[in-house]
Image (cartoon, rainbow, N blue to C red):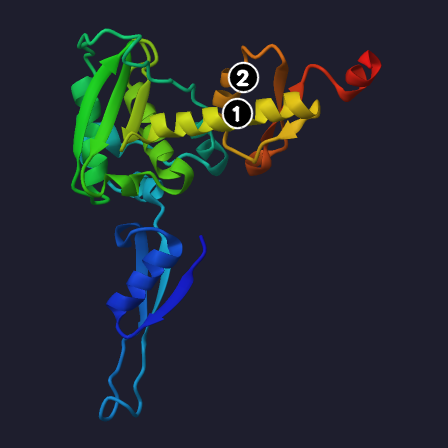
Amino acid sequence: MSYFEFTGKNVKEAIAKACVELETEEALLEVNVIAESTRGFLGIVGQRDARIRVKRRDILKEVMEVDNTPEPVESVTAPQTEKQSSAIEEPISVEPTEESVEEVEEYHPELERACNILKEILDRIPVEVEIHGSVKGGVIYLDIQGDKSGLLIGKRGQTLDSLQHLMNKILNRDNLNNGKLEIIVDTEDYRRRKQETLREIALKMSRKAKKSLKPVSLNPMPANERRLVHLILADDKEVYTKSYGEGPLRRIIVYPRRSMGNKRRRH
């Protein structure tokens, strides 16, 4: 993980610069003070700015390395690097809209346990938040609410996806005989907003492919986002989608079912 250095009239100012430059909050940075600021003689001669070195905290790694006392968390081992991406390979659940679901409160025997485990994890970051749990269609939804809850989203939702992956690993470890549980972790309505953004991108690229009659490539994106784009365009009879590339460079290409050659022949 990369380190960055910043200077300021004092350590506080240097940290503030780091937060602005890295577009994050102090709670998600690991800060090492290289040199304190000095005023110098008469505040002029020998004056020196404070200097710090920072890096982004790996929240998932910190949580996994903690020697937890509660039984559900303590025996979980950190996933290998290649398995880290498996957090993205989990099936996506698109939360039903209010119009399609009656407001009926569902019960799930693991809901309270899920809320408690997530609270234990977040207490070790630490952030002061509240966990609100609900069940829809047999899926457990955990909504993190609080002034600093947005910090848990991370770059492109990576921190939130890691928390969700960890919760699914923990809850399903002791539930082998009762069927696989699905846990969705969200904060500040991020997942719905992300789905809406992906829908707009997918439809825009579909229109572009149909208009140009040429394949259109989207930017690289993680597997869960690609899967949602495939799903959004699955019913569009004028285009089809395929994924190409490896690892973080893997992307979707939208193909028109009609080609430029067909268009020319029609003329």
Q: In the displayed structure, does residue 191 sit left or right of residue 86?
A: left
Locate residue 157, reporting x and y percent: 38, 36
Name the mark on residue 174. none
Mark 2 and mark 1 in contact? Answer it, CB < 8 Å. yes
Q: Is residue 48 left or right of residue 245?
A: left
**Residue 29 or 23: which is nearer the viewer?**
23
Image position, residue 87 (x, y; %): 42, 29
Query: Is residue 238 at least partly visible in the picture?
Result: yes
Residue located 19% across and 12% down the image: 109
Q: Amino acid at mark 1?
A: Ala
Q: Which mark is residue 202?
A: 1
Residue at 19 percent across and 22 percent down: it is 133
> Residue 233 has which mark?
2
* 62 in relation to 45, above or below: above
Q: Secondary structure at mark 1?
A: helix
Q: On screen, 10 above or below 191? A: below
